[in-house]
Amino acid sequence: MQTLIRLLGRKTIGLVANIGEIFILLGKTIKYLKYFHQDRVLYNEQLYRLGVKALPLVGIIAVFAGAVAGWQGAYQLEDTLPPRFFGQIVAIGILSEMGPVLTALVLAGRNGSSIGAEIATMKVTEQIDALEVMAINPIRHLVTPRVVAMVVMLPLLVVVADIIALFTAALIGDLFFNISVRMFFNSFQSVFVFTEDVLPSILKALSFGISIGLISCWVGLKATRGATGVGRAAIQAFVFSATIILINDYAVATIVF
């Protein structure tokens, strides 16, 4: 029993210490935002790599997410509610949950693992130590551009994913359930409120972007033990980011709704 209590105590202390390290890293990241103009080349590179190049993957995910939402929504409504409710139910579900959460989880796997493995490789091969020897701050040049890129691009990608998913769901309703695209968007428009339907999605995307960028960089900076550490960092970057995404999703939903 005492062994179990000691183990729980160590795990709790380690968790609190890790959370503290992440918030310290967040503070340092914000601190170096003042060098944005001087480092704009680094920011542009990360915006393109983490955002623009992720568009095809996000588009594919959005198409199938919209198709599933449209099919399930129309199937559940069949013989229970009039078709005019189809657009309201499906669109709100896409905007509030499927769009931001699925996009964030996909980018946690794509970008989070990439960031974690990249920085971990630099850590175990002592490239970060070399940067410090040359008086180049690794937080400024490695962490801040990646975190900012995730914060900026994730909401934009969520908006793109929402639009693609909405049109896909409307087409599914039109092709298979005889619910016209016009009826879909008229139904949605009749209850659409920006502050209730879109703003929460953007707030979620911002929190997801901060979480993915910050946690992935933190995991990479903590990496040890060669190739094994790099592989572990890639896995942890996705697992930790995905967990925090779901926690943030619940927290934002309870605050906004």
Image (cartoon, helix red, strand yellow):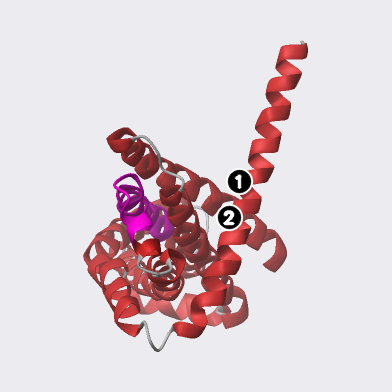
Under mark 1, the amino acid is: Asn
Magenta residues (range): 102-130
Image x and y of residue 19, in percent: 63, 49
Packing grade of label 2 (10 A; few <14, some 14-19, many >=20) is some
Q: Judge whether residue 90 can be spotted in this image.
A: no
Quarter occupied by residue 156: bottom left
Q: Is residue 57 left or right of residue 181?
A: left
Instruction: Name the residue tied to disc 2.
Output: 22
**Label 2, label 1: how many angstroms apart (C-alpha)?**
6 Å
Which of the two residues, 174 or 80, is positioned nearer the viewer here?
A: 174
Which of the two residues, 222 or 12, is positioned nearer the viewer here?
A: 222
Instruction: Name the residue tied to disc 1.
Output: 18
Count of marks, rendered view: 2
Where 42 falls versus 237 (above or below)? Answer: below
Predominant secondary structure in magenta? Answer: helix
Q: Residue furthest bottom?
A: 37
Which of the two residues, 54 or 160, is positioned nearer the viewer here?
A: 54
Where 59 falls versus 230 (above or below)? Answer: below
Asked if residue 104 lies in the magenta stretch, the reply is: yes
Q: Is residue 206 left or right of residue 2?
A: left
Asked if marks 2 and 1 touch (Cβ < 8 Å), the reply is yes
Split into 4 quadrants, where in the image is the C terminus? bottom right
Asked if residue 236 lies in the magenta stretch, the reply is: no
Residue at x-position 41% and y-position 53%: 105
Q: Is residue 197 left or right of residue 105?
A: right
Where 218 falls versus 1 (above or below)? Answer: below
Residue at x-position 29% and y-position 82%: 41
Packing grade of label 1 (10 A; few <14, some 14-19, many >=20) is few
